[in-house]
Amino acid sequence: MTDFILQAMLLMLLLFAIGILIRLLIGPTASDRLVALNVLSAVTLALLILWGVRTKQTLYLDVALVYDIFGFLGFLAITRFLKDRKGDL
Amino acid sequence: MNTRRTWAIIRFALTSLFLFVIWILFTSSLGAFSLLFGFFGSILIGALTYQIFLPEHEANFRFFIPHFGALLRFLALMVYSLYHASFQVIKAIITGNTNPRIVHFRTHLRSDLARAVLANAITFTPGTMTLDLNDDHLTVHWLLCTTTHAKAAGEAIKVKLEHALGRTWL
Amino acid sequence: MIIREVIALIIFLIGSVFGIFGIIGLFRFKDPYSRLHAGSLCGTTTVFSYLIALLMLSPSFSSSARIVVLIVFFLISAPTGSSIVAKFIWESEDAQKQRSSMAKEEKHL
């Protein structure tokens, strides 16, 4: 039962990731791509934690924690970078 | 001068204590070497960063130490409103009728921490998203706008949250 | 044990429904703000539900303690990230275009 739930969760998360990646690739403006990237980072976090629970190793959970903390610092950097060159948004 | 120095020492002690608790939580080991290392590390980092962590003008304990019961109630409200808000957005996705508008309003909360938490909590209420927080002035994008009057709109968004937050942090 | 699994399954199904509609909204809405609303809010709800379900299924105490810390950090970081993106849209140019179209609509009404 537990294995089945974890397998189904992995499948659903991969499905979400594929849908968000399509949005990320076809998004007409930089804003749409950034929105997709924001959702994708949350899905990646869930995937990391899922893998940590599935393989029963807490190392993945530590990695997920650091990923969560530094994730939005990356966003801050990306938005600052894109704001500087407003010409070709 | 003397009160300023006492206040600085209290801020330094609180910062170090907070860092030490986080250290114990993350390492989850109670060995002597680990505890000693964490203690000196948190004192060093606390001495370097207490000016940023707790700014001097936040001159009240209630500004950053939450009331515990009120904090738990606020978290429960947040989880409930997260599901409620998602349900409303799903209804908007199915029917397709949205009414996006940008509203401005001010908040009565006094501490920086409570304002930041309010700005984050507004994102969880149905169809609203904080765009900017400037001192006490909030800019909010509202997807499912019901009233055209900007001030009434602001009241409709924030009153419940401000009431819950006011009991938690002041 | 079986009760924890049933709770996890129910929460997982609820989260999946929110996630599927969030993806549909990501493709159905036309402007970046509405896409951010659909994607970010439904995505946060989905991941939060999955984390609760994983907390129910976690094998040991140390991993459940870490997942609790992760849930708290996620509840802080998710709205902050979407707020950063929203501020970027607000300051970028295509949103200004959209604002002017909204003003035109208001005049039309």
Image: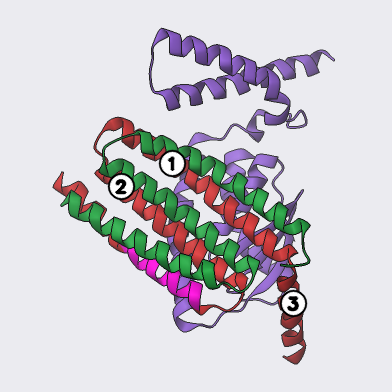
Chain colours: A green, B purple, C red
Residue C10 percent coordinates (x, y) = 25, 59
* Chain hosting mark 2: C
Give the mark, 3 or 2, whose residue is nearer the N terminus.
2
Amino acid, disc 3? Lys
> Closer to the camera: disc 3 or disc 2?
3
Give the residues in magenta: C14-27
Give the residue at x 49% y 76%: C27
Q: State the SS at label 3.
A: helix
- Residue C76 on the magenta span: no
Classify mark 2: helix, strand or loop.
helix
Q: Which residue does the image show at 46% across and 42% down from the upper left?
A: C72
Query: Which residue in the structure is indicated by mark 3?
Result: C97
Identify the residue under disc 1: A64
Q: Could you classify mark 2 by the number of other residues whose Cα lies within 10 Å: few (under 14), some (14-19), or many (20 or more)?
A: many
Please name the residue shown 72% across and 86% down the image.
C105
The quarter of the image holding the N terminus of chain C is: top left
Residue nearest the observer in this picture, B65 or C32: C32
Chain ID of residue with mark 1: A
